[in-house]
Amino acid sequence: MANYHSLFGNLSQIEKEHLQKYEHLYNPIELLSEKFKKYKLISAQKDISEKNAPYVHTVANARKTFGNNISVYKLSNEIIERVKETTIDKMPGEIPELYKKPFILEAHDNKSTLFGDIDSILGFYHDFEGMRKTEISSKPRFTFLFHSKYIQDIEWEKSIQIINEHIINTSNNSRFFYLGFSLFMLRPLEIEDYWDFNFVDYERSIMVNINHCDTCIFKKDCNYISSRDFKLKHHLCLASIWDNLLSFVTVFNYMLIAANSPVKEKRSVEHTNYTINKKGKIVEKTEDWITKYIYLDDIKKVYENNPNPSELNKDGLTLKNVHVRRHLKRVAIGTNHAEREWRIIESYPKNIWVKEGDTKIIVGIKNKNN
């Protein structure tokens, strides 16, 4: 058996037994898609019905929500950078389509990350049975499972275990949980229509160095400083994780459906057959593993260029060149502009004519021939 679990001396007997049975589920180097590809639905259903530790219980519930069809989005590095560079003009009130069914987001390259040190994100709904200290409603809640690059650092492990225990002991809803083996759980959404996010810092890791707090641009808005143990070498920035997860997944969601999107998909399907005993009869089942490789299609890139711009009276004006950042925008379409669609507005240069001594700005689209 691999020696990576030697860092986790506090495993329960139940979890040690499960570790021997499903070692691949605990491998901190494997991405979530790799774990789930080896984890049969029938095994997950059996594990849910038995008494198991939080790690097993959560992974089994996540696997169950996918059923016999598992889809994983594999993002190219170009797509990942596009997502991180794209903003949303205005957030809508409805639930983004991607959140309505379980999903997995990962990079094409297993050595890459989506952002920070997070390399795999899984979203699903379940009722948190066995995960909270107090009684809760049976209404399913949206949950993120996310995986980080494996860090072989005893101090990192000690810090996250202490922080995890503190959160569990002081919170009634177990919104955040470090499950172990580089796997985290976060329930960011209390109500169905809350899909907003505030601060995005894709460069930040899950656990930051103690010195990071003094340099953080969001320090004045932080609500967690008073509860941190500054004797620890590492700290958890939960607010940043929340915003980064929501923003990355939400922007990717709208890039998939936006008009004139440069996102292109190449799909592959693998079929796995297995048998179960159902009321004394042997029944054959099929699991479909669907991989959607997402990458840029340069042909579909659309820029806001006008080859025949109208002439302006430039007397008394000073020309300035600016760069408009790529962003997602909801635009009116159809008869009487009654319908709405998402559209990606690619970054583009603009010539801006500014009148000296006046705040009025006159905008002209840059001519490709100039």
Image: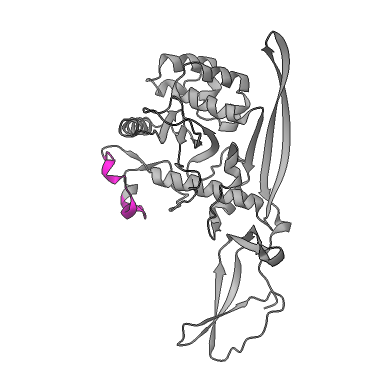
* Residue 131 visible somewhere in the drawing: yes
Residue shown at the point (50%, 40%) measured from the top left = 118
Residue shown at the point (63%, 63%) measured from the top left = 331
In the visual, does 339 lie left or right of 198?
right
Q: Quadrant of residue 137?
A: top left
Instruction: Return the x and y of residue 233 as percentages of the image width and height.
Output: 31, 38
Seen as rendered, the residue at the extreme top is 280
In the visual, does 280 lie left or right of 124?
right
Q: Which residues are magenta?
A: 214-230
Color style of the picture: one colour
Quarter of the picture holding the C terminus: bottom right
Q: Quadrant of residue 315?
A: bottom right
Q: Nearer the viewer, residue 210 or 241?
A: 241
Residue shown at the point (49%, 27%) measured from the top left = 58
Residue shown at the point (45%, 22%) measured from the top left = 5
Q: Nearer the viewer, residue 10 or 66?
A: 66
113 magenta-colored: no
How many marks the image carries: the answer is: 0
* Residue 22 visible somewhere in the drawing: no
> Considering only vertical position in the picture, is 88 above or below 138?
below
220 magenta-colored: yes
Instruction: Return the x and y of residue 220 as percentages of the image width and height.
Output: 31, 55
Q: Nearer the viewer, residue 97 or 148?
A: 97
Seen as rendered, the residue at the extreme bottom is 315
Instruction: Return the x and y of residue 278 as percentages of the image width and height.
Output: 68, 13
Instruction: Return the x and y of residue 69 as percentages of the image width and height.
Output: 67, 31
